[in-house]
Image: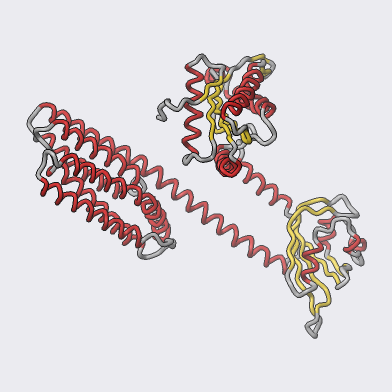
Amino acid sequence: MIIDLNKKSAIEAAKLQQLLSVSPASLVTSTLLAVILTYVQHETMGLSVILIWFLFVVLAALARTTLVVAYRRPLAKGDPTIHERLIRFRAGVLLAGVAWGFAGFWMFPASDPQHRMLLVFILAGLSAGGVISLAYDFVSAMIFTVTVILPLTLQLLVAGDALSLGMGVAAMLYLCFIIMSLRLVNRGLTQSTIVQLEATAREDAMRLSEERYRLLLHHSPMGIFHYDTNLVVTYCNDRLAYILNMPIDRIVNLDINTLNDQSILVALNKALVSQTGYYEGLYSATFSDFSRWISLTCTPSFDINGNVVGGIAVAQDISERKQATDKVEKFAFFDYLTGLPNRRLLLDRLKQAFVTGVRGNQKGALLFLDLDHFKTLNDTRGHDIGDLLLQQVATRLLACVRAGDTVARIGGDEFVLLLEDLSEKESEAILEIEAIGEKILTALNQPYLLAEHEFYSTASVGATLFTGHEREIEAILKQADIAMYQAKKAGRNTVSFFKLQAPLQ
């Protein structure tokens, strides 16, 4: 794929911005790990060797911190220094990787298996964390992973005993797997960055085009009329008469103040005070059945002495554009099949629920619902029948919740219900959730009529409470998802609450 220089620079800028945003956490973590390793390994290694290595790690961290602080200012697209900054960032990563790689040589306790395992554990964890934090830049992630793991791997392979040899082979396999996985992850992140940049460019182009189009309206024969300082129409063209579905003689000499719809008056009056007035919205004509979305631009009309004698208005029917915009917004935030909010809108509302929960000290809940045996229905009856079931399930779920709650479809046969304004007491909130959950199960257990065939279906529901103080939204979704799988293990067609001791993986 050929990428022009400006686009490549923009991708590198976005990549560098992501790398800088996660660097503080990784720097703090690596420094703390160095402290732990230094403290533990000093029992088996020479103190001078350990202190030299620790100083090396700290200096590398300080060098990277200096780069992060220097480059945290906003990055401009096409900035000629972006590539140079990325190269320096990679150099800092190389320095840190080499520093940790030396630990595999200098701090390898050949005669102490426990301390050796600690070293392997720390370096493996550090490399995995580095892959995650540096995944946006394949080169940086590769440099760090190889320089950290390869020295340890070689040390294990030449140690001489069977256990070390096995660990060395395993470390080599781990390194190969990390590299292959890193390539896939980086490719996905890069593609996502490109899509975001292209979307931003399209939005900028659309805004520029709309502004140019607004200026062209002043000189195009759209719907044009002239009015005096008393807001009486003195002239209009054929296009305006066509738009309003009225004859010209009914429009000329019409007093705009007498119209039922007064929404355009503000824009019209601005022209009378030497300003440009704009109106965009729904307009209903008084003397015809015209009721459409219009765009209106009003500018002052001057006499030869520069005095305002009225205004010139250019009107356009923008109903189709409004419908297209609404359609785009609907596809962006709503599921095309059921009309329910999609994952994007759900996350947005969940963020708002977090804010509301913190301010009002109220609890909320997420219910993760998965239809039982839905795949079997799709495989035996076809996707069209499956779609009918999903639509009917959506209708029933909406009937089970309160007005302020959200029912969303996040994919396949998975639905998420966001319940807000629950009781402050956890026990009472749980009772409210159980009541809604039972209502949902009862509704979904009723027979469905799918293409003249009666069908029965059940659902497994996982529930979790939140207060708004939680840090990660995705973690709350994960809890509800885990609870849903607990419901399936419990026999399906039931509601299961997330248990704190359940593993989040």
Residue at figure coordinates x 74%, y 60% from the top left: 279
Residue sitting at the far bottom: 305
Residue at figure coordinates x 44%, y 49% from the top left: 193
Q: Nearer the viewer, residue 284 or 147?
A: 147
* Residue 386 versus residue 199 in the image, above or below: above
Residue 295: give x, y in percent of width and height.
74, 59
Q: Is residue 460 left or right of residue 283?
A: left
Q: Which of 121 and 296 is in front in this view?
A: 121
Residue 388: give x, y in percent of width and height.
64, 24
* Residue 410 versus residue 21 in the image, above or below: above
* Residue 65 versus residue 269 in the image, above or below: above
Q: Which of 89 and 335 is in front in this view?
A: 89
Residue sitting at the far left: 160
Q: In this view, does 100 lie to the left or right of 473?
A: left
Q: How many marks?
A: 0
Quadrant hosting residue 400: top right
The colour scheme of the drawn protein is secondary structure
Residue at figure coordinates x 78%, y 83% from the top left: 306
Quadrant hosting residue 459: top right
Residue sitting at the far front: 425
Q: Where the C terminus falls, by quadrant?
A: top left
Q: Nearer the viewer, residue 275 or 348?
A: 348
**Residue 332 visible to an observer of this rendering:** no
Residue 99: give x, y in percent of width and height.
19, 49
**Residue 265 visible to an observer of this rendering:** yes
Residue 383: give x, y in percent of width and height.
58, 24
